[in-house]
């Protein structure tokens, strides 16, 4: 099985929070874009999508953390640490590209590292906050019933 098959989006990865699910799906699209650029040996394109997926993954994590802070998720500090460890690992690939490393090799490594990390992260750490978001949204439904302003803004 090629890595292309390994890193395909599956509905098993849905966590049930639309805005997060859409961002996760976008990351999987990047994995395909990298694979295409490698296959077609497009050097500039491969560097562009490689930097793009690193940036998108980091900003997705930042967004997720701000959402978790908003809802008062108690595990936000641990979640932040997991994201920070990820950031340290993936930004080193950008430095490798800057230093002139083979972009095709770097891109394949980025794709596999971010892909496997993401799948693992979705199946584990992300699952912990899902019940908190659902509970928060359920209370919002009640707030609406009582004419109060809903707090869920995403
Ligand atoms: Fe996360």
Image (cartoon, helix red, strand yellow):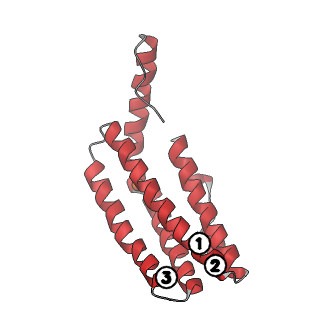
Residue position marked by numbered label 1 in the rendering: 48
The residue closer to the viewer here, 144 or 51, is 51
Local packing at callout 1 (Cα closer than 10 Å; few below 14, some 14-19, many 20+) is some
Q: Is mark 1 on a helix, strand or loop?
A: helix
> Tag 2 or tag 3, which sits nearer the N-term?
2
The relative height of residue 127 versus residue 37 in the rendered view (above or below) is above
Which quadrant of the picture is home to ligand 1?
Answer: bottom left
Viewer can see residue 108: yes
The residue closer to the viewer here, 89 or 12, is 89
Q: In which quarter of the image is residue 40?
A: bottom right
- Residue at the location (69% across, 80% down)? 42
> Tag 3 or tag 1, which sits nearer the N-term?
1
Viewer can see residue 14: no
Whole-percent x and y of residue 102? 55, 89
Query: Cβ(mark 2) to ligand 1 < 8 Å?
Result: no
Local packing at callout 3 (Cα closer than 10 Å; few below 14, some 14-19, many 20+) is some
Which residue reaches farthest right?
A: 40
Q: In which quarter of the image is the N terminus?
A: bottom right
Q: Distance between the residues labelled 1 and 3?
A: 11 Å
Residue position marked by numbered label 2 in the rendering: 44
37 left or right of 101 in image: right
The residue closer to the viewer here, 8 or 55, is 55
Local packing at callout 2 (Cα closer than 10 Å; few below 14, some 14-19, many 20+) is few
Q: Is mark 2 on a helix, strand or loop?
A: helix
């Amino acid at each position: 099985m090629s890595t292309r098959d390994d890193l395909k989006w599956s509905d098993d990865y849905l966590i049930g929070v639309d805005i997060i699910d859409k961002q996760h799906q976008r990351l999987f699209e990047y994995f395909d874009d990298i694979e295409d650029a490698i296959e077609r040996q497009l050097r500039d394109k491969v560097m562009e999508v490689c930097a793009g997926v690193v940036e998108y993954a980091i900003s997705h994590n930042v967004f997720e953390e701000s959402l978790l802070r908003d809802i008062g998720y108690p595990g936000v500090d641990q979640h932040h640490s997991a994201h920070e460890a990820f950031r340290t690992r993936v930004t080193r690939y950008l430095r490798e590209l800057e230093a002139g490393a083979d972009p095709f090799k770097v891109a394949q490594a980025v794709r596999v590292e971010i892909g496997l990390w993401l799948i693992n992260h979705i199946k584990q750490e992300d699952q912990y906050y899902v019940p908190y978001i659902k509970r928060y949204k359920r209370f919002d439904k009640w707030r609406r019933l009582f004419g109060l302003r809903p707090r869920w803004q995403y």
